[in-house]
Amino acid sequence: MIKLLEPVCREHPADLHSRIALGLAQVRAGQINQGIDELRRVVQSHPESVEAWDSLLLGLDESGQVDTMEEEFGRAPAGVADSPRMLKHRAKIAQDRKRWKEAVDYYRRAQAAEPYNRVVEYRLSRALRHVAETGEADRIEERLRSRDLAIQEVRPLFDQATSMPSLGRSPRLELCQKIAQVRERMQLPDEALAWHKLALEADPNNAASLAAVSRLESTIRGRG
């Protein structure tokens, strides 16, 4: 990724997303100083960008530089610091300082803001154990295990689906329902809903998919 992104960033130095991707790729490849420097330059070029600040703090978090992360957070403009995307960083700082109740509060709010962020969910479960909320921690960890298993299951199902040239014209009921179930376990209700609707094209009166569509539409409305 770094080899692909470096020439793009040289040719388009003002491109926010390419430079963020390069900085994070460098951090994740062990080029930590280069990656953090790149992310700092992105923040300097886009000082009001929540995405730029979020990426810098994420790079510092992933490289274990929580003290520097806290310092950088203190420099963020008020409009950035108050963004819901910053909640996970507030939570991580509180967690590192062992302010567990504060960390739980921020992680819960971060989870509401980013419901599919696995790191936030896992860290919430860890923080909950420090405030003796073991029941909720157990439920979160079970959900994470279920999602991890679903991720392993979905690839062969997609391979099977894409090998069928007639899928869009004459969908297979059982296959569509299996994929829908896996996507729901991965906490992707929009995709699960789409697959159940495709299943209903094969069997408009299928009770399982009709019930799933009703449940998922309610979930999506509640999330919005």
Image (tube, grey):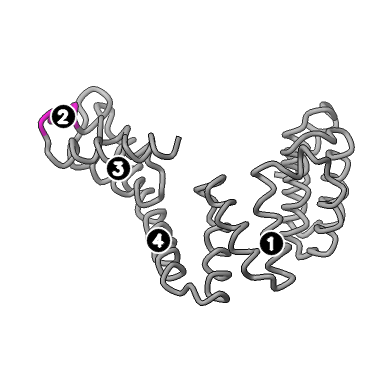
Q: Residue at x 25, y 46 (%)?
A: 178
The residue where tag 4 is placed is 143
Tell me whether circle 4 and circle 2 mark residues in contact (CB < 8 Å).
Answer: no
Q: Is residue 201 in the magenta section?
A: yes
Lower position in the chain sequence, tag 2 or tag 1? 1
SS at mark 1 in the image: helix
Marks 1 and 3, how far apart in space?
33 Å
Marks 4 and 2, how far apart in space?
30 Å
Tell me whether circle 1 and circle 3 mark residues in contact (CB < 8 Å).
Answer: no
Lower position in the chain sequence, tag 4 or tag 3? 4
Which numbered dot is residue 92? 1
The residue where tag 3 is placed is 180
The x and y percentages for residue 35 are 82, 50
The span picked out in magenta is: 200-205
SS at mark 3 in the image: helix
Quadrant where the image shows the C terminus? top left
The x and y percentages for residue 6 are 80, 38
- Toward which corner of the image does residue 166 lie, by quadrant? top left
Q: Residue at x 40, y 66 (%)?
A: 139
Q: Is residue 55 in the magenta section?
A: no
**Viewer-proximal residue among 192 and 70:** 70
- Residue type at mark 1: give it: Lys
Lower position in the chain sequence, tag 4 or tag 1? 1
The residue where tag 2 is placed is 202
- Residue type at mark 4: give it: Arg
- Residue type at mark 3: give it: Ala
The x and y percentages for residue 186 are 40, 50
Marks 2 and 1, how far apart in space?
47 Å
- Toward which corner of the image does residue 98 lie, by quadrant? bottom right
